[in-house]
Amino acid sequence: MVFFMKECIKCGYQSEQNKEKFQEILCDICYAFAPSSEGLFKQYIQDKTNWKLLETFRKHSELRGETQKKGMIKKATDGNLMSRAPFGYNIENKKLIPAGNSKEVEDIFEEFLNSGISLTQLSKKHGLSVNGLKKILTNFTYLGKIKFNNQTHEGTHKPLVSSILFNHVQDKLEKLGIKIV
Ligand SMILES: [Zn+2]
């Protein structure tokens, strides 16, 4: 197995996280300061620097990135990043609260799983579009989770379906070959 470490053209820093700009490899720090015009960029990379001199900035920027990320995750788990409440919830004081129709969510999951009703029929029955119904059946929010940055995190809101029911529904969707767009 060959490990290829990408080396920053400006400072020589080696990292797999290095990025590409105008077909040149740059570390995160050099990338952040790179000019957007190609002409200036060429001059910029000619002006070499030593990655060791940049270590203090690199450490600081990693820390800053982590802190920002934690803040975003906290916001997401508190429901602050949600613009619109999913079916069955309301947003009150930036928190997800089960709405009057919250029981309907569980009904939808159970009906889909246990009755032979088609997605089209089920969506009509609950006044939803087929796509809206599919989104409900695959929405992690109903498990009390929050999806953020393609990762799921534990939320602070009340789940509306059990994980057993949710997982059975996912299995059935998969078996039926239903794609979620
Ligand atoms: Zn660099």
Image (cartoon, helix red, strand yellow):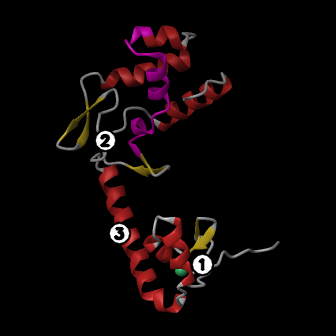
**130 magenta-colored:** yes
Quadrant in which ligand 1 is drawn = bottom right
In the image, the segment drawn in magenta is: 124-146
On the image, the x and y values in percent for residue 73 come to 36, 56
- Specify which label sits upstream in the sequence, 2 or 1: 1
On the image, the x and y values in percent for residue 178 come to 61, 24
**How many numbered callouts?**
3
Relative depth, front residue between 100 and 91: 91
Disc 1 marks which amino acid? Cys
- Specify which label sits upstream in the sequence, 3 or 1: 1
Determine contact: label 3, label 2, CB under 8 Å: no
Dominant secondary-structure state across the stretch colored magenta? helix
Work out which residue is located at the far right of the displayed protein and give it: 1
Residue linked to disc 2: 82
Residue linked to disc 1: 8
- Left or right of 77? Residue 162 is right
| The CB of the residue at mark 1 lies under 8 Å from ligand 1 | yes
Say few, some or many: other residues with alpha carbon within 10 Å of mark 1 (under 14 / 14 to 19 / 20 or more): many
Measure the alpha-carbon separation of dots 3 and 2.
20 Å
Say few, some or many: other residues with alpha carbon within 10 Å of mark 3 (under 14 / 14 to 19 / 20 or more): few
Q: Residue at x 66, y 21 (%)?
A: 176
Disc 2 marks which amino acid? Met
